[in-house]
């Protein structure tokens, strides 16, 4: 039974879902990094919020860990490259608190427009400063959206409902999607020059860090109001304060800060500045939603192999997983076979799907091929880190789909490009379940790829099979299955034999010494 640790406070429904799905769960919160390191080795999954820091050091101690699930959007507290290198899937729940965060941005926009926090403080102090607080309407104003993803699109929808004009800067926003959202796609400079309000809804990356720098803030319209409910670090906070102090920026509202908890920000006390303590996702509904979603996603992965909202692995739905599993088993075996038989540098791996296989999600199949191929080079490879390892080795990876059926209803072909040219192996599924090799380097041969095997390339000549059988018998090696193929009579032949134990170096030398043998190798699956 898979075992999961919930290391941050989370709605009880998460633990309930894990147990209902057949996953053992421990709720142990508030542990120090050293305390977490001491126990993490016994868990297959780790469910977190923002408190637990999943560092490289933690991951080194997580010897059984297969998945980290973040109940929420931001994964700043997870070392994703280190997790990928260890083969750990990292998931988040990008939709569970989307509405909540979008509504908070809208709330802060209203707060800025009508100076609500200051007006409240003044009124409760008994001042009744009616003439001091002159706000602005949102109607007919231009909202500049930096980031038009899931949350940004909800903000845009709500802003349009308030009769605002919305302009958006997002490199990934297509013209078609912009029309669908009812926004105008613009450059960043255009947005800065036109927007009355600017709201940020983008992750913190090297490209977005300080996207509202001192230079860019200077390009904004005088009287602009700025909202950030996304990530601290998107705005130069010192430059923001300078803009507020000078009056160029009419107001700013931040839910996130460069350093959190933010207890001593220079922005505190600045007129027309509104702050909240990272409340974007803090509603009852959102906390329940993200807890439920992370538990469901992790349970799907640990129980059935489904992958949803993973940041370092292709998605694979729980419905797809059963159908894809036999193909992934075949893919891994073919990748392993070609990896064991190919010597020298590989510049390209191509994965061809034909017939019924062409209709499937190819990403997991490709990852399985790469995992099998690289297992000959490193024993830490799996489907998560295989694409990363292939890229690090400079291997080009191609996907090719052919919908027509050939000799087989469904076919998977793995080709590798070497200095000597292109070589390929192909396999199919018998009964849609059983992986079977059907072609090896251009030679038709049907074989199960299982356990220790002996691979022999020889000249097709009478008496060879008898001599080989005698050699194996004298060595006390029992043959499980025997598969033979050849290019033409008297030409090159291929033998694949399954044996009961790994082929020794001594036996391999004797086989290679047989007349007509060109190549002999021990294989393992």
Image: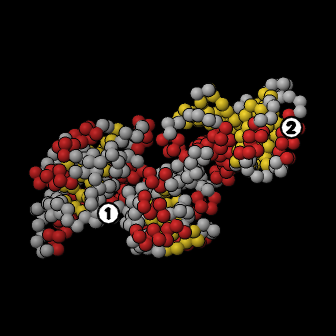
Q: Name the residue at 39% across, 52% down.
A: 151
> Closer to the camera, 54 or 155?
54
Q: Is residue 121 left or right of residue 428?
A: left
The spot of residue 49 in percent (x, y) is 42, 65
Q: Look at mark 1 in the image and give the residue it sits on.
A: 278
Q: Position of residue 293 (x, y in %)?
A: 51, 62
Q: Return the residue nearer the eye: 206 or 373.
A: 373
516 up-or-down from 178: above or below: above
At x 49%, y 71%, the residue is: 39
Tell which tag, 1 or 2, sits nearer the viewer: 2
Left or right: where 298 falls relative to 48: right
Q: Is residue 277 left or right of residue 35?
A: left
Q: Nearer the viewer, residue 274 or 433?
A: 433
Can you see residue 419?
yes
At a point 29% along the width and 59% down the height, the residue shown is: 256
- Numbered disc 1: secondary structure: loop
Q: Earlier in the sequence, mark 1 or mark 2?
A: 1
Q: Which mark is residue 454?
A: none
Residue 150 is situated, as x and y percent measured from the top left of the image, at: 42, 50
Residue 289, above or below 466: below
Answer few, some or many: residues within 10 Å of disc 2's Cα (few below 14, many 20 plus, some between 14 and 19).
some
The residue that disc 2 covers is: 467
* Crowd around label 1: few <14 · some 14–19 · many ≥20 (10 Å): some
Q: Give above or below for 243 relative to 38.
A: above
Residue 432 makes an appearance in the image = no
Q: Residue at x 31, y 50 (%)?
A: 200
Q: Quadrant of residue 135?
A: bottom left
């Amino acid at each position: 039974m898979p075992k999961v640790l919930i290391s941050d406070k989370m709605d009880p429904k998460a633990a309930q879902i894990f147990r209902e799905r057949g996953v053992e769960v421990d709720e142990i919160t508030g542990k120090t990094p050293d305390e977490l390191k001491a126990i993490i080795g016994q868990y297959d999954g780790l469910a977190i919020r923002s408190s637990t820091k999943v560092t490289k050091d933690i991951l080194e101690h997580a010897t059984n860990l297969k998945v980290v699930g973040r109940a929420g959007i931001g994964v700043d507290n997870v070392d994703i490259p280190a997790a990928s290198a260890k083969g750990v899937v990292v998931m988040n729940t990008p939709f569970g608190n989307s509405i909540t965060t979008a509504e908070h941005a809208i709330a802060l926009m209203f707060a800025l427009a009508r100076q609500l926090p200051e007006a409240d403080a003044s009124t409760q102090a008994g001042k009744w400063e009616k003439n001091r607080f002159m706000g602005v309407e949102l109607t007919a104003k231009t909202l500049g959206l930096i980031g038009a993803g899931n949350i940004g699109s909800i903000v845009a929808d709500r802003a349009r409902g308030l009769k605002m004009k919305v302009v958006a800067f997002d490199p990934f926003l297509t013209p078609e999607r912009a029309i669908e959202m009812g926004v105008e796609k613009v450059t960043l400079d255009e947005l800065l020059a036109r927007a009355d309000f600017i709201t940020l809804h983008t992750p913190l990356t090297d490209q977005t860090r300080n996207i509202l720098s001192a230079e860019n803030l200077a390009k904004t319209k005088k009287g602009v109001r700025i909202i950030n409910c996304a990530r601290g670090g998107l705005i130069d906070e010192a430059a923001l304060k300078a803009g507020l102090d000078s009056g160029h920026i009419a107001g700013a509202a931040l839910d996130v800060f460069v350093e959190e908890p933010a207890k001593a920000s220079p922005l505190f006390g600045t007129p027309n500045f509104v702050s909240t303590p990272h409340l974007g996702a803090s509603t009852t509904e959102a906390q329940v939603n993200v807890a439920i979603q992370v538990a469901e996603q992790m349970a799907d992965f640990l129980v059935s192999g489904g992958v949803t909202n993973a940041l370092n692995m292709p998605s694979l739905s729980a419905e797809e997983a059963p159908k894809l599993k036999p193909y992934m088993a075949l893919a891994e075996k073919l990748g392993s076979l070609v990896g064991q038989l190919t010597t020298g540098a590989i510049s390209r791996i191509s994965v061809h799907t034909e017939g019924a296989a062409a209709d499937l999600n190819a990403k997991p199949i490709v990852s399985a091929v790469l995992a099998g191929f690289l297992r000959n080079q490193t024993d830490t490879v799996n489907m998560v880190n295989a694409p990363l390892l292939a890229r690090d080795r400079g291997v080009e990876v191609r996907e090719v789909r052919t919908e027509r059926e050939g000799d087989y209803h469904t076919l998977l072909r793995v080709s590798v490009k070497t200095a000597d040219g292109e070589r390929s192996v192909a396999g199919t599924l018998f009964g849609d379940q059983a992986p079977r090799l059907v072609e090896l380097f251009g030679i038709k041969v049907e074989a199960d790829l299982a356990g220790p095997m002996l691979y022999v390339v020889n000249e097709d000549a009478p008496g060879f099979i008898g001599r080989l059988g005698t050699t194996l018998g004298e060595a006390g090696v029992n043959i499980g299955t025997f598969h033979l193929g050849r290019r033409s009579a008297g030409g090159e032949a291929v033998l694949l034999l399954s044996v009961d134990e790994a082929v020794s170096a001594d036996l391999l030398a004797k086989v290679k010494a047989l007349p007509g043998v060109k190549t002999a190798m021990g294989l393992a699956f």
